């Protein structure tokens, strides 16, 4: 029994290492996209989809999962679910890349801070889950944050809201797809490759397009978008197999923390006092729900052990 416990602990520890690596890569991916800030965000997303689909085709081949993909694409309902997920992922990626190349990195951080709260809102409004008292408090704090930040920006923080909403909805859509995370992403990119390729062709005639003006170094960054998309996902897929979601969720906050730091300290984006107040309400909301999850886990664990 002691050996089994140690083995389980070691698997969780290794899973945490995979998760941290994935989240660090996702966080610092902002620096990667900044190297391409001279190009149109829509064109960059089209290239990312095409390059990601090529990488995922290689991954599916290595995993020997083509039979799974054929079965998935023979089901109309699965194809529709994959298409919905692909649309949400494209909007999420597009919003994020647009914000990064237009010097609004801090707003992406806000979006990914809000995303866990958006996921909880979907659980309540869509799946009929009953919110805890802590979650109700978090919703109120998040609502106050959006109001404060709307005043600070002089407009609603639309990019942050779109990022949070699409990422939360994407998570909900993934629950309806009976595929593993890698095969699911592969299916989504395969569905998106045709419109993405059409978009690349349509946008390539512009004088500032990737095809017309990219330097050799920029081409390396453009073609590398598939790899930087796939690697953190594969790491995350490994982590999700062993790490409890009550731990995986809080670790996810590394991504917006990194983006917040990069936007404020590295790229010098404006952070007036009222904006800090707005973020503080978001952080308070996240602290409340995280503490609630940890406390619940501590209470339930002894009961399970004695059951």
Image (spheres, rainbow, N blue to C red):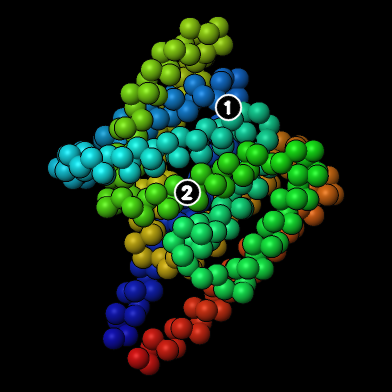
137 or 236, nearer to the observer: 137
Q: Quadrant of the C terminus?
A: bottom left
Residue at image coords 42%, 68% = 244
Query: From this viewpoint, which residue is outermost toward the right?
Result: 273
Rounded to the nearest angstrom, the CA distance separating label 1 from label 2 is 29 Å
Residue 122, x across and y down, in percent: 50, 57
151 or 244, nearer to the observer: 151
Give the side of residue 244 with respect to residue 58, left or right: right
Position of 171 relative to 96 (above/below): below
Q: Quadrant of residue 62?
A: top left
Residue 252, x across and y down, in percent: 53, 56
Secondary structure at badge 2 equals helix
Q: Which residue is mark 1?
A: 35
Secondary structure at badge 1 equals loop
174 or 54, nearer to the observer: 174
Residue 38, x across and y down, in percent: 60, 20
Q: Quadrant of residue 54?
A: top left
Position of 41 relative to 288 (above/below): above
**Res 169 label:** 2
Q: Residues within 10 Å of mark 1 (few under 14, many from 20)?
A: some
Residue at image coords 68%, 57% = 142
Question: Can residue 262 be seen in this snapshot?
Answer: no
Position of 221 relative to 198 (above/below): below
Give the side of residue 130 with respect to residue 176, left or right: right
Residue 211, x across and y down, in percent: 46, 12
Q: Residues within 10 Å of mark 2 (few under 14, many from 20)?
A: many
Position of 100 relative to 41 (above/below): below
Question: Can residue 216 be seen in this snapshot?
Answer: yes
For marks 1 and 2 on the same chain, the one whose residue lies earlier in the sequence: 1
57 or 91, nearer to the observer: 91
Residue at image coords 27%, 52% = 178
Give the side of residue 12 with respect to residue 30, left or right: left
């Amino acid at each position: 029994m002691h050996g089994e416990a140690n083995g389980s602990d070691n698997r969780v520890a290794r899973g945490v290492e995979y998760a941290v690596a994935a989240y660090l890569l996702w966080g610092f991916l902002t620096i990667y996209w900044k190297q391409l800030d001279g190009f149109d965000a829509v064109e960059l997303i089209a290239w990312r989809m095409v390059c990601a689909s090529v990488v995922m085709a290689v991954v599916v081949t290595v995993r020997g999962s083509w039979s799974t993909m054929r079965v998935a694409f023979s089901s109309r309902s699965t194809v529709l679910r994959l298409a919905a997920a692909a649309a949400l992922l494209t909007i999420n990626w597009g919003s994020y890349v647009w914000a990064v190349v237009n010097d609004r990195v801090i707003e992406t951080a806000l979006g990914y801070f809000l995303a866990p709260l958006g996921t909880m809102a979907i659980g309540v409004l869509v799946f009929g889950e009953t919110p805890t008292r802590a979650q109700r408090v978090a919703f109120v704090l998040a609502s106050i944050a959006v109001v404060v930040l709307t005043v600070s920006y002089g407009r609603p923080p639309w990019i942050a809201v779109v990022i949070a909403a699409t990422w939360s909805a994407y998570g909900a859509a993934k629950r309806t797809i009976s595929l593993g995370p890698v095969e699911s992403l592969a299916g989504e990119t395969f569905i998106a490759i045709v419109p993405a390729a059409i978009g690349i062709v349509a946008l390539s005639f512009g004088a500032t397009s990737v095809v017309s003006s990219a330097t050799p170094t920029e081409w390396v960054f453009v073609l590398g978008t598939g790899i930087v998309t796939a690697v953190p996902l594969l790491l995350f897929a490994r982590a999700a197999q062993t790490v409890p979601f009550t731990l995986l969720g809080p670790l996810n906050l590394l991504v917006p923390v990194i983006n917040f730091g990069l936007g404020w300290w590295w790229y010098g984006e404006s952070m007036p006092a009222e904006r800090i107040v707005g973020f503080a309400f978001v952080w308070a909301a996240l602290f409340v729900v995280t503490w609630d999850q940890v406390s619940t886990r501590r209470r339930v664990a002894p009961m399970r052990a004695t059951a």
